[in-house]
Amino acid sequence: MTAPGKTARIGTGPAPFAARLGPAARRMLLSYLILLLVYGCAVAVNPEFLGWGTMRLQLVQATFIGLIAIGETFAILIGQIDLSVPWTITLSAILSTNLAAVYGHQWIAFAIVIAVGVAVGLLNTLGVFVLRVHSLIWTLSVNLLLQGIALVYTNAVAPTTHIPGAARALALGNVGFMPAAFLVWIVCGATSILALRAMPFGRSIYAIGNSPAAALLSGVPIGRVTALIFVISATCAAFVGLLLSGYSSQAYLGMGNDYLLPPIAAVVIGGTRLSGGEGGYAGSIAGALTVVLLQAILVTLNISEGARQLVFGAILLALALLFLKRRS
Amino acid sequence: MKPPETARPAAPRRRGRIEKHLGPVSCAIGLAVVIGLYALRQPLILSPFGLASLANVSVPLALAAIGQTIVLLGAGLDLSIGAEITLVNCFAATTMQGSPLGIGGIVVLSLLIGLGLGAVNGLIIAYGRVEPLIATFCTSFIYGGAALIILPRPGGTIPAGFANALTGNWGILPFSLVLLAAAVLLAWIPVFRSRLGRFIVAVGDDAESARVSGLPVRRVEMTSYVLAGLFAAIAALFLAAETTSGDPTIGSIYTLNSLAAAVLGGVALTGGRGTAIGPILGSFLLSIILNALGVFNVSAFWQDCIEGLILMVVLGLGGLRLLRGGNWLTVLRQ
């Protein structure tokens, strides 16, 4: 009903170039325009955003959100969502740093990250795929369970302050002038884009997102793909947990609480449809940077916590109203 | 997406009819079992005061779950219900004591704010064409932020008269249950006995066919969010009376729990299917289980673990129901 009006409303108008692009590509392009706009605002508010020192910090922050957004993009592309991220982050950070300290070997931490990722991912798959519970509510319940496990564990064993050196190096170190974490993001991001564009895995994802029944009939192993996606999502979150503990030199309860909504906002700003089947990770990269810059602008403005939340919500809402109309 | 009604074989349809009552009935059985176990451990719970306290911990969730159910019936989703509760709660707690409008004026104003917050959600979703999940997620930030601005930390006061009027009891009948019944009688029943209710269900079942049949889809969608805002405001006023103060984090648990209670009570997250009694029973079951953990000497550290496990088991049992018959293809189409 609004489809013809929608194309006309996009800023550049029906120029030949924009018209040749598919709707998904147009939405991705739009997400980079939004990023430019927000960056412009950031520079206008505080010219320091032009300098590398400030931007370097933003890139590291964006890495945390962007890495989580990898799993979230996959999950949203198949029409699901993963809301168990916050306490996957916290539990993985606490468990991996503690056990690495106990066994005295820092690589244990990475093994724990993968173990937590696989366990949480399979638990999510159990509910979402095997038991057919809506992922929104199942993964929130899993999040609650993980919160409980983290509370019980930290009640028995105090979190360590001894953070594995490798985690600190990844989160705080530099390779040349680039933050090491950002390089990790580049590698993971490029792999994700490649997987979505050029591998059978990616084609399966879009097939499931468009119609699970049709995907099943065409022989897509929907169960295995769903499980893989939830394991990837949980592993990304678990890895970010370890990075965050390296970044702040501690693992503490509630450290993941700020990472539930920004990654989803990044995916949505990046032009991936919440109903699944359309979008990709390239847009989510712009989305992650946009979200981080928005947060940084609000911090720069030095307003109260309440006003900051209000403005963040209002800006997201304005972006959604302007650019994220659903199909009718 | 869904196959037309006539294409569906007869057997699943009969199963669908059974399923409509499965949620409420299993909640009622669960509720009886939980209260029975609770009473064995702590017989005082069957005294008028005990019953009133059980009702008082459950009623706010029941109200939030009814609001969530109305939106879910229309195939929407309200992630801002917790923030709506928080904002109205903070407003009432900061203005009610010594207000020139009197307590009644503030109550009316609070309900109007609830309607307004719901209307904002409805406008964005129905007329702004934004997905319910992202729209209510954004407004939950806005409402939560506004609540923090009004009341940065727990505080404010609620007049004792107002608090007693909502949380007291009359023999074995707690006032909170009267409030819940009044809310259902005055808001739910008129809506779902009228055309509006059937329109909401029709839109939730299949928005496209509803539009083709000439239903005012946008107005119907909008109305469902306005009603959810109203129920959130009633829940907020009740919470204010229960705690006799305001708290800028009080509502956050109600977003997930209202969804869970609705699903427990047999409401479909995909829209078009559900009752009022199911979510109410689901809310009581959920609230009383959580309340009972303390009585059974469960350490507070285990509470989240157990709450999560209960939610997962119950949701999983609901899912197993779907898997009972048919192959993957019929399962995927549900």
Image: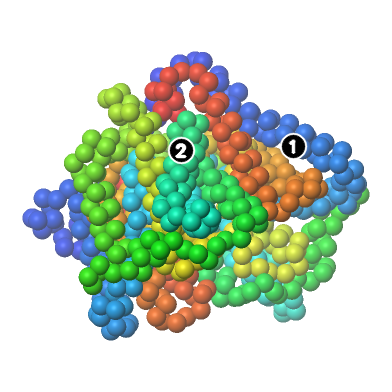
Query: Of B301 and B90, which appears nearest the observer?
Result: B301
Residue B189 on image: x %, y %: 65, 43
Image quadrant where residue A11 sits: bottom left
Residue that mark 1 sits on: B31
- Say if B280 sits above or below A298 in the image: above
> In this rendering, which labeled residue sits more in front, label 2 or label 1?
2
The subunit carrying tag 1 is: B
Q: Is residue A293 left or right of residue B13?
A: left
Asked if residue B138 is positioned above or below residue B31 in the image, the reply reads below
Viewer-closest of B195 and B84: B84
Identified by mark 1, the residue type is Leu
Quadrant that contains the N terminus of chain B: top left
Residue sitting at 80 percent across and 58 percent down? B167
Residue A169 disc label? none
Expressed as whole percent of the image width and height from the top left, the position of residue B260 reads: 59, 44
Q: Secondary structure at mark 1?
A: helix
Residue at the left extreme?
A: A16
Instruction: Return the residue at label 2.
Output: A122
Q: Residue at x 41, y 27 (%)?
A: B333
Give the residue displayed 42% in from the left and 48% down from the top. Answer: A111
Regarding residue A248, the answer to whether it shows in the image is: yes
Q: Pinpoint the chain carrying mark 2.
A: A
Looking at the picture, how far across and down is residue B30, in whole percent? 72, 34
Question: What residue occupies the far top of the structure in this picture?
Answer: B10
Residue B258 pos. (x, y %): 60, 48
Note whether residue A44 is visible: no
Label 2 and label 1: CA atoms lie apart by: 31 Å
Q: Amino acid at mark 2?
A: Leu
Q: Quadrant of residue A164?
A: bottom left
Question: Considering only vertical position in the picture, is B147 above or below A234?
Answer: below
